[in-house]
Amino acid sequence: MTKGVPDIVIPGKVTFLCELKRQDHTLCRISDEQIEYLEVAQKMGAFCCVALGWESALAAFEDYLKNIDKKVVLL
């Protein structure tokens, strides 16, 4: 297994990568490996995000769908 791979990976014309964390940010942390993975993937054109809870992950995915043709990359 590769260290830092996000929880949600959807390959496509623009890959969607989402690291899913607890909604209460005080109960979780993102590792250096996760940050590094997302930064490299973003530089390669992936849509990257860190979501606090499933609702944030869903909102990020909706943004991804709206902007997939524009190749907008967010982190």
Image (spheres, rainbow, N blue to C red):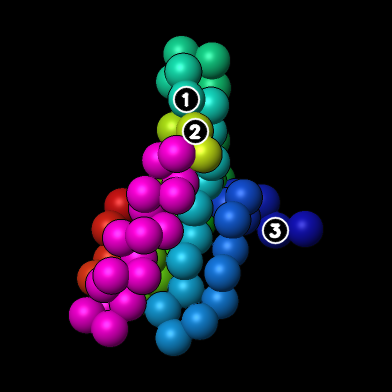
Say whether residue 6 is magenta.
no
Which residue is identified by label 3? Answer: 2
User: Which type of secondary structure does the marked residue at label 2 adopt?
Assistant: loop
As helix, strand or loop, the secondary structure at mark 1 comes to: loop
In the rendered structure, are the residues bearing label 1 and label 2 in contact, judged by CB atoms less than 8 Å apart? yes
Of labels 2 and 3, earlier in sequence is 3
- Which one is in front in this view, the residue at disc 2 or the one at disc 3? 2
In magenta, the rendered stretch is 55-71
Q: Which amino acid, mark 3? A: Thr
Q: Any magenta on residue 57?
A: yes
Horizontal and vertical percent position of residue 62: 36, 60
Residue holding disc 2:
53
Residue labelled with disc 1: 23
Q: Is residue 36 left or right of residue 59?
A: right
Q: Is residue 3 visible in the rendered structure shown here?
A: yes
Q: Secondary structure at mark 3?
A: loop
Q: Are marks 2 and 3 in contact (CB under 8 Å)?
A: no
